[in-house]
Image (cartoon, helix red, strand yellow):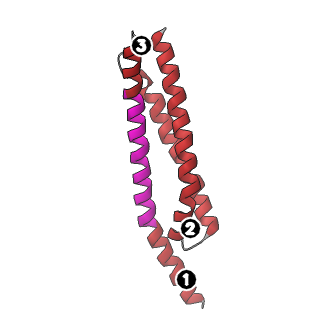
Amino acid sequence: MMETVALGLYLAISIALTVWVAHILSANGIVFLKECFGHDDTLARSTNHLLVVGFYLVNLGWILLTLRFGRPPETVADTIRFLSSKIGIVVVVLGAMHFFNMNAIAKFGRKVGEWLREDQVRSA
């Protein structure tokens, strides 16, 4: 019984955390993406949406895969340790995904921004 409660709490907290982080990153990341993509609103919004979908897929996949890991809790204290370990791993993965995405976008965005500026110079 304790294991079922712990797993339910793990899923609820981890999925809610993933949705919240995706929303925050999406809402605030659009400004960064517009700057990276030479103020091309369509490209920035499209990229933002694709990043959110990828973020959900990777993180929800990770959450579901890790359901099977860990010793089932038998007491309330075990449940707290179980949840803190599992949710802690989810938080670290969310943070790693964020920094990976920011690094990739910054590198790719600079190149796209340069291409867009070169096109603008050529067409002027």
Using the numbered discs, state the Cα–Cα distance from disc 2 to disc 3 in whole angstroms.
Answer: 48 Å
Q: Which residue is mark 1?
A: 119
Displayed quadrant of residue 123? bottom right
Secondary structure at badge 1 equals helix
Q: What range of the chain is rendered magenta?
A: 85-108
Secondary structure at badge 3 equals helix
Closer to us: 38 or 21: 21
Using the numbered discs, state the Cα–Cα distance from disc 1 to disc 2 in whole angstroms.
Answer: 17 Å
Q: Residue at x 45, y 72 (%)?
A: 111
Q: Residue at x 64, y 66 (%)?
A: 42
Magenta segment includes 87 = yes
Q: Residue at x 47, y 67 (%)?
A: 109
Q: Earlier in the sequence, mark 2 or mark 3?
A: 2
Q: Which residue is mark 3?
A: 76
Within 10 Å of disc 3 (Cα), the crowding (few <14, some 14-19, many 20+) is few
- Disc nearest the viewer among 2 and 3: 3
Q: Earlier in the sequence, mark 1 or mark 2?
A: 2
Measured as percent of width and height from the top left, residue 71 is found at: 35, 16
Q: Residue at x 51, y 83 (%)?
A: 118
